[in-house]
Image: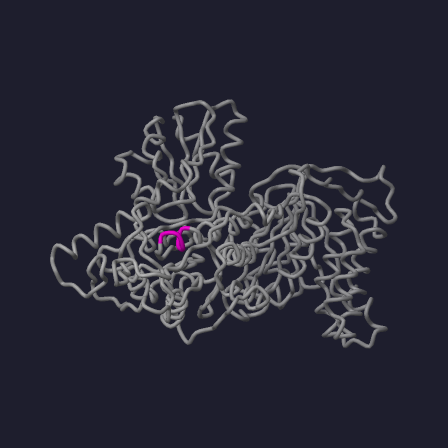
Amino acid sequence: MTVDTTSPDEVQTLDQVVIRFAGDSGDGMQLVGDRFTEISAAFGNDLATLPNFPAEIRAPAGTIAGVSSFQVHISDHDIVTPGDVPNVLVAMNPAALKANMPDLAPGTTLLINADAFEARNLDKAGYASNPLEDGSLDAFNVYPVPMTSITVEATKDLGVRPRDAERSKNFFALGLLCWMYTRPTKPMIEWIEQRFKDKEQVRAANLAAFRAGRNFGETAELFDHPYEVAPARLRSGTYRNIVGNLALAYGLIAASQRAQLPLVYASYPITPASDILHELSKHKNFGVKTLQAEDEIAACGIAIGAAFTGALGVTGTSGPGVDLKSEAIGLAISLELPLLIVDVQRGGPSTGLPTKTEQADLLLAMYGRHGEAPLPIVAAKSPADCFDAAFEAARIAVKYRTPVILLTDGYLANGAEPWLLPDVTSLPDISVEFATEKNHGDEFWPYLRDPETLARPWAIPGTPGLEHRIGGIEKEDGSGNISYAPDNHEHMIKIRAAKVAGIANDIPLTDLDDDGGTEVLVLGWGSTWGAITAGVRRVRARGKKVSHAHLTHLSPFPRDLGDVLRRFDRVLVPEMNLGQLAKLVRAEFLVDAHTFTRIAGVPFRAAEMEAQILEMYR
């Protein structure tokens, strides 16, 4: 790392820091937070992020409801969460300060845009007096910086109107943070040059603001010294920074390539899943076909139709979309065609909390259809893991000719972390053989099953001699003829269930981080992985033995899960719902699982997890 003008002797080394950018929805906090993350990733830090923003396109400016924030945790060692509370808060206005006060510990560094703390904004935020003057911030390290006025001054010779110049104050804050944490300047300048190359005044204003912020840190003598967070020692390989939705899109592309099937992705816009469609639409070179349907039902129908014609059919949505797709998913189960349904979970019910995270769709995925209609469920545990989870879900779908639900959530979708690029050649071959010959004398029986997987043949329409009917009405096993025979219906119900249950023999055993004790097991799934892992590490550091099992496969469960659960005296199941996995575990394995639930729209914190695990020893 090169620090342009600061002597290395003046730099204080930190092993980690948590920074939160907070401001009004129009202040560009997500943009500068993302840029700081990218710079840190390129520098070699391990990192995790937590974007947090309102669902409204434009909440009233200057109000608590309109506050948007972006938290990034960077370190010189392996980390798994975006951090519990910020060490540094950048507050662009009074509302941003007030909204984040509950998360601040004494001693937190506050970088405050002092220009915004005027009477009108204080009143909008609900302050009776100016917190910069009334002593209410005495417990913190407060740095009031006139970010807006310095930005306007720095851009006055560029021909930019003052009102437009003010919009660059987020880059002033970014420049100041880059000085404080010795981030390299060149990549940021190059990014601004490229990003705004077609908007000359915007480009010039942002560059001026960024440089002004960095120069302010260097010359204002407000700060004792800058800080350094050294690169982390990660497993060797090539890394890139990635968010969950992007990793998931790449996983789908990789699966289609290794399955040798064209990828057809059909969806209807919905937060927080829409970015998957946006990304996949850029990859026609891989044979990816994308379609924005008129509604969720149509999107699912298109994906089923694509699967019928021999493609990897995928539809993505969030919980409300799964509600609407449920009838079509039942049709796909009856057709026994591969179909991948991506559910990026968000806070519900109904419109609920569109931009906030939750993992309360597990029972919806498990039972949200009429009739006996089981299907496999796969869950991603981290942003980068969305790649692997998407690949695994596709593998199961095409091998067993069944719909598969892939669960992620808003935290994974928008959160970022370093991703070790996989060796593409090491990805398994998941290609399938389409039926090309008659398989029952002179006939083609579309439900004559593979004896090992119980999957039926996959015959592309138009294949000579393999014409067959499909539809939702019950069919005779083997021939596929319509059948209302009572015994056949029961047989078909049971054989479809047996097909899904048999997948347990084709998935890994329980992913158990075993510390050798038998007192406490923490059982998790999905995005709680980071907080549980960090909580378990802290409890172990206190000298206690605690094990952690994290489930990728939720239907069927790993075949050894019951044995694993019964080895421990107590089982704790943390979930961002009211105990849905715990309910399933109790019913399936008769284990008295303890729940730790929270539905706040934000992920668990490691400190919360640590405290709850310690409670299990009392």
* Range covered by the magenta-colored residues: 396-400
Q: Quadrant of the C terminus?
A: top left
Task: Please state the horizontal and vertical placement of residue 515, each as a whole percent of the image.
Answer: 47, 25
Which residue is at the front of the view, 515 or 456?
456
Task: Please state the horizontal and vertical placement of residue 152, each as a whole percent of the image.
Answer: 78, 69
Task: Please state the horizontal and vertical placement of residue 11, each as a whole percent of the image.
Answer: 80, 40
Res 131 quadrant in image? bottom right
Which residue is at the front of the view, 99 or 254?
254
Outermost residue toward the front in this view = 442
- Here the colouring is one colour
Q: Answer whether residue 354 is magenta in the image.
A: no
Q: Is residue 152 above or below residue 609?
A: below
Q: Residue at x 26, y 68 (%)?
A: 471
Res 569 quadrant in image? top left
Task: Please state the horizontal and vertical placement of residue 499, each as a whole percent of the image.
Answer: 29, 49
Q: Give the overall secondary structure of the magenta segment.
A: helix
